[in-house]
Image: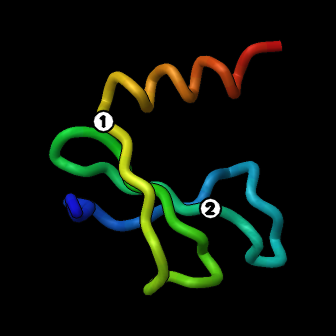
Amino acid sequence: MERPNQPWRKSSYSAQNGDCLEVAPTPSGRAVRDSKVPAGPVLTFPAAQWRVLLTHLTRD
């Protein structure tokens, strides 16, 4: 598994109760994890697929 090369960060849209996802850059894309389980599973996305995901999530 590709490891993040910078610290994890929470979205500015995250709830204040800690229930959110964290994102970190990796050498070839992004990694995503559950903030409540930082040692748990991590999803990794190559850069191209990350852009596609963000495009679909931000469409009105």
Say which label, 2 or 1, has the lower sequence index: 2
Numbered circles on residues, count: 2
| Residue at mark 2 | 21
State the image quarter where residue 55 is shown. top right
Name the residue: 24% across, 51% down: 26
Q: Quadrant of the N terminus?
A: bottom left
Q: Position of residue 30 (x, y in %)?
A: 36, 46
Q: Residue furthest top?
A: 60
Q: Quadrant of the C terminus?
A: top right
Q: Position of residue 9 (x, y in %)?
A: 49, 61
Rendered position, 43 above or below 48 = below
Q: Position of residue 57 (x, y in %)?
A: 69, 27
Name the residue: 29% across, 40% down: 29
| Residue at mark 1 | 46
Disc 1 residue type? Pro
Rendered position, 47 above or below 30 = above
